[in-house]
Amino acid sequence: MLHKKIATIEDVAAIAGVSIATVSRALNEPTKVADSTRRRVSEAIAQTGYTTNAMARNLRMRRSNMILILAPDVGDPNFSNILVGLETEASKRGYGLLIGNTQNDPLREADYLRFISSNQADGLILLTGHLPYGIGGADASMRLPPMVAVGEPVANADIPYIGVDNREAARVATEHLIAQGHRRIAFIGRSPGRVVNGLRERGYRAALEGAGIGIDPAMIIDGDSTTESGRAAAELMFVRDRLPTAFFCVNDATALGVMIALNARRYDLPADFSVMGFDDISFSSFVTPALTTMKQPRLNIGERAMDVLLALLEGGEPHEREVLFRAELIVRNSVKAPRTRF
Amino acid sequence: MLHKKIATIEDVAAIAGVSIATVSRALNEPTKVADSTRRRVSEAIAQTGYTTNAMARNLRMRRSNMILILAPDVGDPNFSNILVGLETEASKRGYGLLIGNTQNDPLREADYLRFISSNQADGLILLTGHLPYGIGGADASMRLPPMVAVGEPVANADIPYIGVDNREAARVATEHLIAQGHRRIAFIGRSPGRVVNGLRERGYRAALEGAGIGIDPAMIIDGDSTTESGRAAAELMFVRDRLPTAFFCVNDATALGVMIALNARRYDLPADFSVMGFDDISFSSFVTPALTTMKQPRLNIGERAMDVLLALLEGGEPHEREVLFRAELIVRNSVKAPRTRF
DNA sequence: ACTCCCAATGTAAACCTTTACAGTCTTCGT
DNA sequence: ACGAAGACTGTAAAGGTTTACATTGGGAGT
């Protein structure tokens, strides 16, 4: 391997017999340079293997063409497809993705902002559901970079949100249960603090009210969206002995927990109880019975989110406040008409 | 929000009454500047909210402190924890992670190399199992950046590999089946092209040979590591009517496919057949029966891989050829002694 | 008191682009 | 044949750092 120094624009210019300005123009505004010159430049570039030094360009242009993604957990199955969508669109438009795994640790969030403040990233995608620690607050000296919230809306902040219409989707899900004949439908995973959980609960309530079914507070159980919280919630209902015929769970992880609890008690699903999830994460189709759920178009959400952010970034387009996608009802085997035991 | 211009090192210098060189030194080599001066500089920095412009610094220093991760599929459950490990270590050492989702598309691979050739990334982590298209080959003009392979070794290239000792782990797994009394053990997921599959097959063979069990070619079925390939492989064995008592699957996804096929044929697991996986991806503990498998220490692998790459990058340390981790046998419910039907 | 050394600081170059502005040359209309 | 317009190209500044080298000043050693 030769220790040939990396070629700069000057080397190219010298070989092509033009000035560096012309080389730059040949690259960036080809119409502005004569055909013959352009040919010579191309040849010199091929000969030297020249590539533009992105750092010099970025310094000069004051933009990095880099987007920072802040996510609480890159391992989350809900996250990965969104990431693919983000990546697809970004890559198509010549942007790179910088990834920040925050684990919901304020220190890490704050630390990642160094990419913004040092100009290494032009924009920010938030999957955390809140503004990163260290932004906006007392330290208002840091200007807010263009940003977009995905999946989880950001409370109390005027940030464009791209995601599924959670309220509407939860309504559709609950109505599906009602259509199967269920009247006593539990909502597992209430969590007033989380915007998404709140919206899904509202959709659940709307569906019940729309069907003239009264809302029984004993049917609404708190949970933090984890599998364990689902298991505990189902268990709690048995202890209290106020049982539903169907469980509408705030997400698939919770639904899985409910199913584990039900299986442990030797119930037969879906004959004894129906379970409905939300998200359609990968294993939902493999579990037995396969989980009926609402599928989020994660790929589209990711792509669109990146699209909105880049529009914001590149100026021009007016600021879209929110983009809501419709979730799709995926009917599998975990929902059935209730046993007529009354 | 004021339109205050972003502070540069010059602003800080002016306020502190020193030259920009001193400010730079106060930041990077604090011992080289007098205490009193350093204090004034700190104060000026606080006052202006100055942050060093990473682009200017990178241009000058000729390094970006950025690592490019090339992965065929960021959505792969096997990948995400490795990513967390990579990220943890990188972040600890002040590096950022640039993420490239290649989908095994040569064009995308080549495209991502622009980050390397334009100096936007200092090093490369390969999860793809092969050199990116466009590197090394005819276009040898591009110098090989420091790189490390993770999870999937790179064939025919002298690239440090960090991952699990696949051969040894497969041997342990197979021996576990043998210890339960199995003699007819299938290997599902042979794929001579894939290094990992090859190593796991070798471990399987070694275990059988070590136990004095002959190798029956009919017990070794091809597969591409997907759930569908597992299903098809099991089905094939039924069609051929040469059945094992246990299935050792090249990975958990394949094992899941095998279980689906077995369930579809109304067999009772693990009474009728034992199934063993490899990887311990998240849903393996939720499926019924819960899957016995080999767990990869993915977090550690990721951290170590980043560590090796950074050592390479920062010079000094001698090049470690490979780092092998031991996989852990996770005993769940999918493996049992074979029914004595002979 | 003189020299020498060292600590602290400053000056200016280098890193590699993009682009405003200025200059040259061709062409075309009259 | 002359002027203007327009196409093409060149010059040089700017973008914000880091750092080699030069400079200054004060203290220690003799």
Image (cartoon, coloured by chain):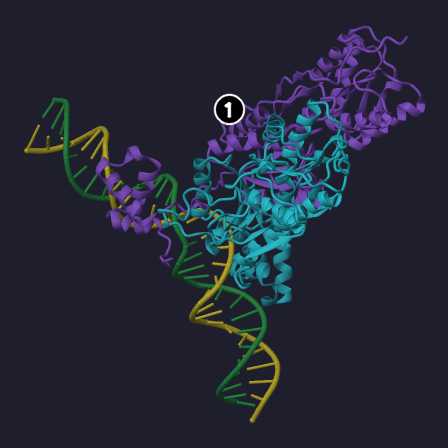
Chain colours: A purple, B cyan, C green, D yellow
Q: Residue at x 43, y 40 (%)?
A: B110
Packing grade of label 1 (10 A; few <14, some 14-19, many >=20) is: few
Identify the residue at image location x=60%, y=43%: B215
Give the amino acid type for the residue marked by disc 1 in the picture.
Glu
Is residue B301 or residue A78 the one in the foreground?
B301
B150 vs A235, left or right, is left
Numbered circles on residues, count: 1
Kindly tell me whether residue B247 is visible in this rendering. yes
Would residue A61 be found to the left or right of residue B230 on screen?
Answer: left
Percent x, y for residue A30?
31, 35
Side (left or right) of A40 relative to B273? left
Would residue A191 be found to the left or right of residue B169 on screen?
Answer: right
Q: Is residue B132 above or below residue A150?
A: below
Please, which residue is most extreme toward the right here? A240
Q: Residue furthest front?
A: B342
Task: Specify the quadrant that holds the C terminus of chain B.
Answer: top right
Q: Position of residue B173 (x, y in %)?
A: 69, 45
- Residue B5 visible, this orientation: no
Against D16, residue A222 (above or below) is above
**Residue depicted at x 61% and y 46%:** B205
B331, B206: nearer the viewer: B206
Residue position marked by numbered label 1 in the rendering: A317
Which residue is at the front of the view, A9 or B21? Answer: A9
Q: Residue at x 49, y 44 (%)?
A: B130
Q: Position of residue A135 (x, y in %)?
A: 66, 39
- Along the line of sight, the residue nearer the viewer: A121 or D17: A121
Query: Residue A231: horizontal and vertical position, in percent?
Result: 83, 29
Where disc 1 sits, the SS reads loop
- Quarter of the image for the N terminus of chain B: give it: top right
Question: On screen, A84 above or below B17?
Answer: above
Using the image, name the chain to which the residue with label 1 belongs. A
